[in-house]
Amino acid sequence: MNHSLPDSEILYSALVNRDSNFEGIFVVGVKTTGIFCRSTCTARKPKRANVEFFASAHDALLAGYRPCKVCTPLEYNGAAPDWLKPLLAEINDDPLIRLRDSDLRARGLDPSRVSYWFKRHHEMTFQAYLRALRIGQAFGRIKHGESVTGAALESGYESLSGFADSFKKTTGFSPSKSQESQLIATTRILTPLGPMLAGATDDGICLLEFVDRRMLETQLERLSKLLNAECVPGFCKHFDRLSSQLEEYFSGKRREFDVPLVLPGTPFQQRVWTALQTIPYGSTRSYKEQAETIGLPNAVRAVARANGDNRIAIIIPCHRVIGADGNLTGYGGGLWRKQYLLNLESSHGPR
C-alpha cells in the first residue's frame, strides 16, 4: 500500500529531534553513507541536503540503501511507538472501550497524531477502528447464541437501530444474519521484514501477507468473496499461536508450522499450495519441478500463477520456488524478502 508522507521539512525536524512520534511513519536515507535509519536513530544527524525520506524500509532498500546497524530499521518495522503503546494495551484489555478526543487529550495524546497512525497502519481512523472492534465482539456473541438486543447493550449502544446500522455498515449484513455468516478477523503481526496482515476465521488462518504487498487489497477482496465474509480488525483464537510460531521461525527455532489453515480456491490452486508445503525447509524447487510434483509437467505457467495467488506467505512457502536457472523470480512480498527468507533457512540448514 502506498502512503503519502508529511512535508519533508517536518520529517527532517523529526529526525533531528529524534521524535518517536514519527516512528514507523518514515525512514531516512543518508546519501553520503548509503545507509537508511529510523527517525529515532541516535547516530550523528546528517545535513538536510544529504538525506531523502521513504515511507518504508522496502522503498529505501529498492533505492539502494543499506540498513543502519545502530537503529536496525529492518527489525520489527511498523512497531507502535512508545507514546502509543499504553493506549493500545488499554484497547487490548477492553475492546469495547469508547474514547473521545477529550479522552485522548486527558491521556496526554494528540488526537490527530493518533488518527494519523491508525490511518497509516490500519487504513481507518481511530474511531472507525474502535467501532470495528466493538462490532466484531458483538458478532461473536450473537454467533454463539446471545440475543441481538443483549449484544447491542453489551457493546454500549443505547439504540437498537443505531447498533443495527453500525453493524451492517461494518459487516455488510444485519445482526440477525450472524448465525449464517462469518467475519474475517484481521490483525498486524510484526516481523523483522516489516509488519504482516493476518486474517482468520474460527476455522483457521486464511491470510498472511506483508502489508506493503502491491496486490494486498485485491487479495482481500478475493478472499472476502470466496468466504462470503467481511474483513474486520479484531481478535481471534489463532493469532497468538501464529504470532508465536512466526517469532520462532525468524529466530531459527521453527521449521514447520501447525496452525490450522483455511484455503479457499480452485482444486488446481489447492493442489499447488499443498505441493508447496512439501518443499523441505532450507530447500528450493523450480517451477518446472513443482509442475512435475503435481503430475502436470506442462503446466509450469499455471503453477507460477497459482504460486502468485497464495495468500499465506511463509507458512505456505512459495518463497522456496525459484527459476530453472537458479535466479529468484516472482515474489509478492518483494525479491529482497524472498532472498532474506532463503538466506535465513539456508543458515540454519535443512533437516
Image: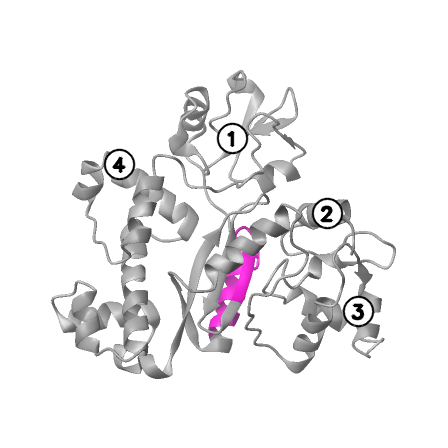
Query: Residue drawn 47% across and 28% down?
Result: 39
Look at mark 2 in the image and give the residue it sits on.
339
Q: Can residue 217 be found in the magenta stretch?
A: yes
Gap in angstroms between the C-alphas marked 3 and 2: 19 Å
Quarter of the view holding residue 236: bottom left
Q: Position of residue 199 (x, y in %)?
A: 48, 63
246 or 198: nearer the eye? 246
Mark 1 / mark 3, whichever is N-terminal:
1
Relative to residue 276, is residue 96 drawn left or right? Answer: left
User: On residue 109, which mark appears?
Assistant: 4
Up/down of 143 relative to 186, above or below: below
Gap in angstroms between the C-alphas marked 2 and 1: 23 Å
Look at mark 1 in the image and give the residue it sits on.
38
Give the amino acid type for the residue marked by disc 3 in the picture: Gln
Quadrant in which the C terminus appears: bottom right
Mark 4 / mark 1, whichever is N-terminal:
1
Give the amino acid type for the residue marked by disc 1 in the picture: Arg
Mark 4 / mark 3, whichever is N-terminal:
4
